[in-house]
Image (spheres, rainbow, N blue to C red):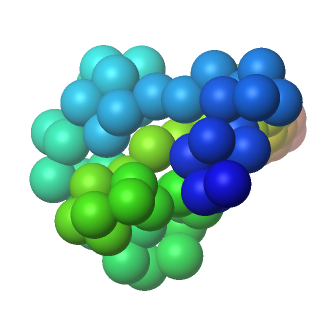
Amino acid sequence: MSIMDDLVASGDNLLTAEEVAEVYRVNPATIRRWVREGRLKAVPTPGGRLHRFREREIRALLAEDAQADSALVLSAEVVEVGA
C-alpha cells in the first residue's frame, strides 16, 4: 500500500497546490516554493513530481496565521493609543 493509498483510506482530504494557492490567494508557484523552503508540508504523489496537502494541516496553518495577524493588529492598536 502506498502513502497515497494510506491517506485516502484514512479519510484525509488532500488538496492540490492550486487549491491551496486559492486559499492563500497566491500563485501555485509560491506554494511549491513554500514546500521547498519547508514552510508547508506536502505529500508527494507516486510519481514524485506533484504534491498534495492535507486539508486539516492547511486549515490549522490558516488558523495560526489568523491568530498572528490578530496579534499584530492588537499590538499596532496599543502603540497607536499610547503614542
> Is 73 left, or right, of 26 in this rendering?
right
Q: Is 5 in front, or is 48?
A: 5
Q: Kindly tell me whether residue 44 is visible in this rendering.
A: yes
Residue 66 visible within the image? no
Quadrant in the picture for residue 63: top right
**Figure quadrant of the N terminus:** bottom right
- Quarter of the image where one finds residue 27: top left
Extreme residue in the bottom direction:
37
Measured as percent of width and height from the top left, residue 77 is found at 75, 28
Q: Is residue 57 above or below residue 32?
A: above
Which quadrant is home to the C terminus? top right
Front position in the image: 55 or 79: 55
- Rendered residue at 66%/29% (across/down): 8
Q: Position of residue 49 (x, y in %)?
A: 23, 65
14 relative position to 35: left or right: right
Q: Is residue 1 above or below residue 55?
A: below
Residue at the image point whose x is 46% and y is 28% from the top:
15
Counting from the top left corner in percent of width and height, residue 17 is at: 31, 39
User: Residue at image x 19%, y 42%?
Assistant: 28
In which image quadrant can residue 30 be found? bottom left
